[in-house]
Amino acid sequence: MRDKISQLFCLQKTECKNNSADNRGHNVSTKATSNGTMCANGSIGTEGPEATETDSSGTGRMRKPLERNGSTQNDTVHLERRLGLFSGVALIVGTMIGSGIFVSPSGLLVRTGSVGVSFIIWLACGLLSLLGALAYAELGTMNTSSGAEWAYFMDAYGPAPAFLFSWVSTLVLKPSQMAIICLSFAQYAVEAFVTECDPPGGVVKMVALVAIVMILFVNCYSVNLGMAVQNVFTAAKLVAVVIVICGGAWKLFQGNTQHLSNAFNGPMPNIGAIATAFYTGLWAYDGWNNLNYVTEEIKNPSKNLPRSIIIGIPLVTLCYALINISYLAAMSAQEMIESEAVAVTFGNRILGALAWLMPLSVTVSTFGSANGTLFAAGRLCFAASREGHLLDILSYVHVRRLTPAPGLIFHSLIASAMVLHGTIDSLIDFFSFTAWIFYGGAMLALIVMRYTKPNHPRPYKVPIIIPVVVLVISVYLVAAPIFETPRIEYLYALLFIFAGLIFYVPFVKLGMTPRFMNKVTLFFQLLLEVVPTSSMAMFE
């Protein structure tokens, strides 16, 4: 079967040989081959004899340089740097502006009971997302490996916490995020054709599954196609945002400000209610860290990563603030709460015969957001599996299209299962609680590495107060709901996180591998036409 794979892919022969069955994560020497490439652990590349720094996290890993040279024809199969500044901004904006602003406004009003408080929380969520993203920009320019939190946990804490993050994110966080967005997409798409009753649940789920398959095809076919779709849909959703804002401005010009007056009437929400309201608002902003998952594919990440963040997140915050004002110019807070499709209700009141543009705009927005979510999620699988934290096949790349197809397919399958068995509200609460545990962990990682790696190059550096503030808020967001309204779901989430140790100890720490896994890996290689990016030893 090995011969069949080698013949099928017709890969060039290399002079690199793997000296051990599994040298992932250990320091090894490199040697030059006859074609000028460097070889280590059976890998080839064109980075040249650049100095590498041994990671002081205790894992013994070799740190890659902050910037890699551009790819050449002599490179092994790998992910290429194709994302510029515009694509980086499009990925952030296109992922953040998705279903949240169309699903969350009513939920946030319910939990705060006040128009004014809900508006303040919308702005506070935007500020928190910006601060968190700026801290991530420092982490992402220190270590330009894909994988975001997984890579930073490896540097700061070692392999065990990094594995727990990849365990939870791969099986729960990223798939649930995509499932929520696709369910929102399907709900608005079906509602455009069903006007006299609620959309049938079965039909909504089937449409959501079709959307997942379409997005999976786009991202497996080509990285360039995936980013082209992202850029086009981001532009389209910004047009939709402008339509909403202009409609709201027209209503305000006509004097419809009654729903904005006395914005702070009503009792103030308690501490736990504010935390859960933040969950709802932060869900709408989620995606601010997605660019860190694809840093290996960003051109000049030391500059384009922070620039994309500084442009993208304030733009989204401004859009959200103006959209909420526009909603309240056309309907009352109670009408927003009672509407299951706020944007559609807004369109019916403002656009008249063109009201159909609103559900169309929402479906465009959510489809683009789902596309960006899967684009980033596949890179997490790719990075963690490459280190041996997940199945090896998930780190493989299509031999011709250079896309991480196995990781993309894996995430899509789990997201499809969640679509069939979950609801939007339950998925949002679980996602938000679990995600902020790891966001806080990333802030702590940055603080820790300020002391453990004080001399490490930092092309972009934030004031230490920023990660400290985000860490404190993360602790509050995780702890407040538990103490205010204890729910068994929070315990289940924590147990699921630490259940990952059951798999980490035998399969990662001790390196145990079932005998049949080699055959399974080879089978999927033949089926999917994928190869590893860092080791060609199997072809020797």
Image: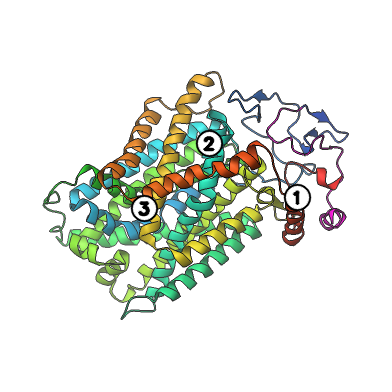
Q: Point out the tag, 2 or 1, that comes first from the N-terminus.
A: 2
Q: Tell me the distance, in whole angstroms, between the alpha carbons under discs 2 and 1.
A: 27 Å
Residue at mark 2: 161
Q: Tell me the distance, in whole angstroms, between the alpha carbons under discs 2 and 3.
A: 23 Å
Vertical relation: 303 (above or below) 261: above
Q: Tell me the distance, in whole angstroms, between the alpha carbons under discs 1 and 3.
A: 39 Å
Q: Point out the tag, 2 or 3, that comes first from the N-terminus.
A: 2
Amino acid at dot 2? Pro
Name the residue: 19% across, 47% down: 269
Name the residue: 19% across, 44% down: 270
Instruction: Report x, y in % for residue 528.
Output: 72, 60
Amino acid at dot 3? Asp
Helix, strand or loop at label 3? It is helix
Q: Does the magenta stretch include residue 491?
A: no
Instruction: Report x, y in % for residue 433.
Output: 38, 46
Q: What crowding class fits label 3: few (fewer than 14 Cα within 10 Å), some (14-19), or many (20 or more)?
A: some
Residue at mark 1: 515
The reply to whether residue 430 is in sight is yes
Q: Which of 374 and 496 is in front in this view?
A: 496
Instruction: Report x, y in % for residue 272.
Output: 25, 45
